[in-house]
Amino acid sequence: MATPAEARVDLAAVRHNVALLKERAGGAELMGAVKADAYGHGLAPTSRAVLEGGASRLGTAFIGEALDLRAAGVTAPILSWLITPGEPLDEALAAGVELSAADVRLLDEIAAAARRAGRPAQVHLEADTGMSRGGAPLAAWPELLTRARELRAEGVVEVVGLWSHFACADIPGHPSIDRQLETYRTALKLAEQAGLAGSHVIRHLANSAAAMTLPDARFDLVRCGIAMYGLSPIPEQGDFGLRPAMTLVARIAQAKRVTESSGVSYGHLYVTDRETTLGLVPLGYADGILRHATGRAEVLAGGRRRVIAGRVCMDQFVIDMGDDPLAAGDEVVLFGPGDRGEPTAQEWADTLGTITHEIVTRIGARVPRVHQNVTQGISQRA
Ligand SMILES: *Cc1c(COP(=O)(O)O)cnc(C)c1O
């Protein structure tokens, strides 16, 4: 390791997790959610592992992310589901990217691009079944179906998917879960009556939490993100046999003896209570180490857990190493699978009052992703 820090991504773990999810999904297809740089794990190498592990499709939030995958040579079906007016739909269609539409305005914009391209757009219609985020509310769903039918008759739109998203699948027993399932079934029935359902149309509702715990929600395909990366979709229910793929490490940039009563970092929030050795860790809030981790989160150095001493700065933070024989260049593990006694991303999330999604996606672009077990024992920088 010649860089100050790196995020090691174990692609064998990704493949293991995807295979486990596929098994849990019964006969359903698996779409790997690889938005946000594959949840911070590195888009192209991780997506390839996701496909090798048994996913048949990929999903991104933005069209740009799907185009990045195509540019990297990924040919699997890709769906992009978060589209704003004026985006490069022509490029998306030329790249064979499937698009989600939740209102007539966007569907018409997609249809216009398809007319220019001289080929039909493949569209997944999104119903809002109770999350009130994206999607057509049930009241607007029939209008969307009608327009989709007209555009299909014109030959510019093919409806290939009907989908929605859970608000509370990670809260087992939440009353909204059954209500959303019921509303989704109603939306499917309306689509069927409009002649827009059938064996060629993929029905999908479940995220990782639902794929793991709600067999009724699997339909034709499950869309999984967090679990593929080995992080539990429902931490209260354990790890489901998943294996965390990312290990975030840094090397100590400077180690030095300081006297008792030395104030450490901005604001002197930490003051040494004895003569001690401080270690400078070259990762900061610009790299996704939340400033809120100040004095809270732990790292592993020299075989022992140490709480971040004082303020997390933009590029660096300090740890108190006592009299332990640690030196510049020694490795500090912020989080990983936990095998060596290091904290996990789940511990970081719990400590910081957030979810693991935020811990891993915030790791900044300055931190190289180093992919391990790319195929068989080969490691590669992305
Ligand atoms: C991110 C996302 C997913 C994956 O969610 P996880 O909880 O990470 O499994 C699925 N569907 C949509 C629409 C998403 O935005």
Image (cartoon, helix red, strand yellow):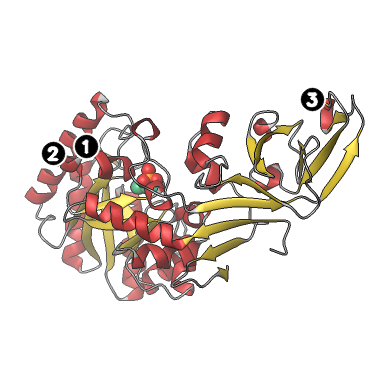
Instruction: Tell me the CA gap for discs 2 and 1.
Output: 9 Å
Q: For the residues carrying marks 2 and 1, which lies nearer the camera in this image? A: 2
**Residue with the mark numbered 3:** 269
Amino acid type of disc 3? Leu
Residue 17 image point, x, y percent: 36, 54
Q: For the point 49% across and 37% down, which residue is it?
A: 346
Residue 244 image point, x, y percent: 46, 49
Q: Is residue 282 above or below residue 233?
A: below
Q: For the residues carrying marks 3 and 1, which lies nearer the camera in this image? A: 3
Q: Is residue 76 above or below residue 171?
A: below
Amino acid type of disc 1? Leu
Is mark 3 in CB contact (under 8 Å) with mark 1?
no
Q: Nearer the viewer, residue 333 or 171?
A: 333
Q: Earlier in the sequence, mark 2 or mark 1?
A: 1
Is mark 2 in CB contact (under 8 Å) with mark 1?
yes
Q: Nearer the viewer, residue 18 or 206?
A: 18
Q: For the point 37% across and 61% down, which residue is it?
A: 15
Is the residue at mark 1 in contact range of ligand 1, meaning its CB lies under 8 Å from it?
no
Amino acid type of disc 2? Thr
Q: Earlier in the sequence, mark 3 or mark 1?
A: 1
Quadrant for the C terminus, please: bottom right
Instruction: Tell me the CA gap for discs 3 and 2.
Output: 56 Å
Instruction: Tell me the CA gap for discs 3 and 1.
Output: 53 Å
Point out which mark residue 186 bears: 2
Point out which mark residue 69 bears: none
Q: Nearer the viewer, residue 298 or 86?
A: 298
Quadrant for the N terminus, please: bottom right
Q: Residues within 10 Å of mark 1 (few under 14, many from 20)?
A: some
**Residue 80 seen anywhere in this rendered image of the structure:** no
Q: Secondary structure at mark 1?
A: loop
**Residue with the mark numbered 1:** 138
